[in-house]
Amino acid sequence: MKNFTIPKEKNIYVGIDIGSSKICCSISTIDPINGTLQLLGIGTSPSTGIKIGSITHRENLISEMETAMREAETMADAKVSSAILSISSEQIRGINTQGAIAVQKNQMNNVPIQHEITQSDVQRVVDLAKGISLPIDRDILHVLPQEFMIDTMDKIKDPVGMSGHRLEGHVHLITLGTTAATNIANCAQELGITVDGLVFQGLASGTAVLDQDEKDHGVALVDFGAGTTDLAIYHDDGIRHASVLGIGSGMITNDIGVMLQVGMEEAEKIKQTYGSAKASMSSPELEFDLPVKNGGIARRISEHELSRYVEARTEEILRLIKREIIRSGLRDNLTYGVVLTGGGANLKNITGLAEEVIGLPVRIGKPKGVQDSVGIASNPQYSAAVGLGIWRFRPEELHIDYGVESPVQETIKKVFKWFGDFF
């Protein structure tokens, strides 16, 4: 493979989306003329080394990450040296918490004086908010400020420079198992990639597909992947709930494979070509041939009969998503309903069924504001990969950087240093 180099004056943003059905690497840069993100290259590889967010075959995962990365490098004419990785796992949990401090500085008397809030004050509040007790095998992945309060004033996004006696901060913590994060990062390190960060897949997708109005007035982002389904609920321009369901569109593929007695690869093609989330929208008269193996009997099935299998499983998954939204206690705050993205969002007529089951408006989320000469960035299955590139470009959309380094990142650095001591 030819070694490509990146011009030093170019800012390159690399994201590697690690899913249960595919690995996707995106290479982006900033257009110097209009300041938008420009997709330079994207590469994909089937994923066989990870299931439901857990590594099942480490060597397969490393090889597939390399395949996706090399394909993106060839398209972008660039060499990847560092990247941000996505992660989705049933181990991921979201927690709302808060912290508060008195902002009075040293005083010589008992007269209360309002003092200007500094970056250090905000840091202290965030530290207190994330100072919760976690199991020894669990750590914080993201610290996402929701709002601050100064005395009786609330809904403040950036309190630095304002004055008051008491500062309170509300944050959303996203936690996961430290081992899962470290193992995924270690696979990238095997390829000589510096891991710049790990990002919850649901947040990465939300960065790429959501409008600011949706984040302000309430929306549920559902990343419908093959092995997992990520849920991130926004309201008042902040994350209010995050969770991962250990189900995905791969279950629909599996049903087709079992019912029709075909391989999973063939079942996936059948689902994409003929399947519909609503059987009533498919014709019982339109039939297609099923693959014949080892001298078997030729078989045909109608699109309507196939879609009955598809609808049954899709409805079950959507009901679980609805239950999680209700469990969050935020259903009544979702002015903009649900934005459905990820590979599963490509299933025909899924928005109609989702609106019936969930009882909220539903739209398909596609990456926005990205220049794409190759014409594939608008596909929902690339939302997380594109969002990883935007994450470093516009981090203020999701959190204010108060110098809080994720404990997960600290752990990963220690592990890499430990390995480095041997070589």
Image (cartoon, rainbow, N blue to C red):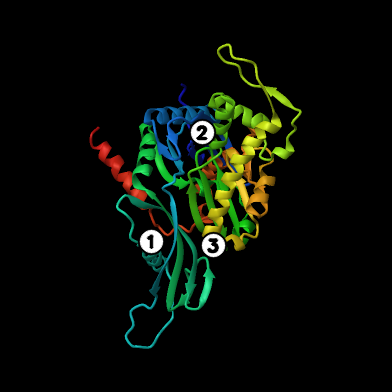
Query: Can you identify the residue that label 3 sits on?
Result: 329
Task: Point out residue 201 in the picture as x, y percentages from the top left corner.
Answer: 50, 45
**227 vs 157, nearest the viewer:** 227
Q: Amino acid at mark 3?
A: Gly
Query: In the drawing, does residue 241 fall left or right of residue 417?
Result: right
The mark that comes first in sequence, 3 or 1, is 1
Q: Amino acid at mark 1?
A: Lys
The mark that comes first in sequence, 2 or 1, is 2
Task: Point out residue 290 in the picture as x, y percentages from the top left corner.
Answer: 64, 21
Q: Please tell me whether mark 1 sits on a helix, a strand or a loop.
A: loop
Count of numbered circles on the image? 3
Q: Amino acid at mark 2?
A: Ser
Quadrant of residue 174 within the rendered picture: bottom left
Task: Point out residue 120 in the picture as x, y percentages from the top left corner.
Answer: 39, 66
Look at 58% across and 27% down and name the residue there: 267
Q: Please tell me whether mark 2 sits on a helix, a strand or a loop.
A: loop
Query: Can you identify the residue that label 1 sits on?
Result: 130
**78 vs 139, nearest the viewer:** 139
Query: Can you identify the residue that label 2 sits on?
Result: 21
Look at 38% across and 28% down and name the residue there: 59
